[in-house]
Image: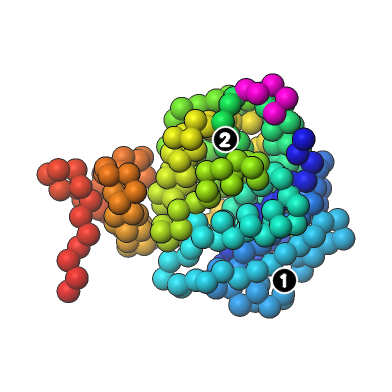
């Protein structure tokens, strides 16, 4: 049975967010055995200038090759998983750098995985997803968030169900999978082969990964009581979103032989950020 959870975080900048994440892990009911932090072109992080270490778990900080024009989230997640598994981790908990795990996030993930392995249901590889709530902007950045009161302060994100602690819910709405806070076993990660590193920057890489899990006979499952909390961050600019959408659409077509259909792209089309041609294709602008 899984007993060695690892937390995996990918980041560049957002140092205060990352330190708040470590604070959240420190007050959790089940701390990780290892925390892997991937530096995507963050010199201060790579050089160990942030106080991330603790005697409660092993902290590993490693760089990943990065083009500063687009962060390699998919490749960084794969490398983080390799490092965690090399340390003996058998439960991989991926947490966005802006997310603070709740007091029982890791405990609930491990309990859900243990129950699934004992019962055999659901079968196949499983993506265990935490409902993520949105925190307001800090009134006093020097004091940070009250870690025991985050639930009362936050708002539930769209699509995140309200479940009782210990309750799980299988969903076939793969487009709702977001890589903000999720878990899977090391065995399942190896089985599906990780994220497609051809995707660079944020966008369709998570939906692609969820589809791979689905095609392998797996499931996406929400875990009640595993709530995590997202700190406010600056949104992508329309220009950034357009760039990622066009590039990711190309990768999706090459991998799946069809045009991607995702709420993110639907929103971008509705806002005029990108366009589809008469066939529904998102064209790549001609190079000048």
Question: In the rendered view, does 196 fall on the left or right side of 267?
Answer: right
Quadrant of residue 207 within the rendered picture: top left
The picture places residue 232, in percent across and down from the top left corner, at: 56, 53
Q: Which of 15 and 183 is in front in this view?
A: 183
Q: Is residue 151 left or right of residue 67?
A: right
Numbered marks: total = 2
Relative vertical location of residue 219 with respect to residue 58 in this rendering, above or below: above
Quadrant containing the C terminus is bottom left
**Could you say where residue 79 lies in the image, as x and y percent from the top left?**
59, 60
Residue identified by numbered label 1: 50
Considering only vertical position in the picture, is 80 above or below 253? below
In front of the other: 62 or 159: 62
Check the image and tell me how it is coloured.
rainbow
Measuring from the top left, give residue 71's x and y in whole percent.
47, 65
Query: Foreground mark, 1 or 2?
Result: 2
Q: Residue furthest right?
A: 55
What is the x, y in percent for residue 120?
65, 23
Q: Residue at x 34, y 48 (%)?
A: 255
Residue farthest front in this picture: 191
Q: Residue at x 41, y 57 (%)?
A: 199
Mark 2 residue element:
loop
Residue behind mark 2: 125
Up-down relation of residue 38 to residue 160 (above or below)? below
- Asked whether 118 falls inside the magenta stretch, the response is yes
Can residue 17 be seen here? The reply is no
Q: Is residue 94 visible?
A: yes
Residue situated furthest left in the rendering: 278
Which residue is painted at 26% across and 42% down in the image?
Answer: 258
Question: Which residue shows up at 73% across the image and 31% down it?
Answer: 114
Highlighted magenta segment, given as a residue range? 117-121
The quarter of the picture where the N terminus appears is top right
Q: Element at badge 1? A: loop
């Amino acid at each position: 049975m899984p007993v060695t959870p690892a937390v995996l975080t990918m980041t560049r900048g957002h140092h205060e967010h990352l330190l708040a994440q470590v604070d959240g892990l420190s007050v959790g009911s089940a701390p990780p055995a290892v925390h892997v932090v991937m530096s995507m072109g963050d010199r201060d992080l790579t050089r160990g200038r942030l106080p991330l270490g603790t005697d409660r778990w092993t902290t590993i900080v490693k760089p990943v090759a990065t083009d500063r024009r687009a962060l390699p989230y998919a490749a960084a997640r794969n490398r983080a998983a390799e490092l965690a598994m090399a340390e003996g981790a058998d439960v991989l908990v991926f947490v966005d750098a802006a997310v603070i795990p709740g007091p029982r996030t890791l405990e609930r993930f491990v309990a859900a995985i243990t129950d699934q392995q004992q019962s055999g249901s659901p079968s196949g590889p499983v993506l265990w997803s935490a409902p993520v709530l949105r925190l307001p902007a800090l009134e006093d950045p020097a004091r940070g968030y009250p870690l025991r009161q985050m639930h009362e302060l936050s708002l539930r994100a769209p699509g995140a169900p309200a479940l009782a602690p210990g309750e799980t819910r299988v969903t076939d709405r793969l487009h709702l999978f977001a890589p903000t806070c999720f878990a899977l076993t090391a065995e399942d990660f190896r089985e599906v082969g990780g994220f497609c590193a051809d995707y660079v920057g944020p966008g369709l890489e998570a939906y692609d990964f969820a589809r791979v899990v689905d095609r392998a006979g797996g499931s996406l499952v929400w875990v009640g009581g595993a709530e995590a909390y997202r700190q406010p961050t600056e949104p992508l600019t329309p220009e950034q979103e357009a760039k990622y959408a066009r590039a990711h659409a190309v990768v999706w077509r090459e991998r799946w032989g069809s045009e991607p259909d995702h709420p993110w792209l639907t929103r971008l089309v509705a806002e005029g950020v990108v366009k589809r041609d008469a066939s529904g294709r998102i064209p790549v602008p001609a190079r000048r």
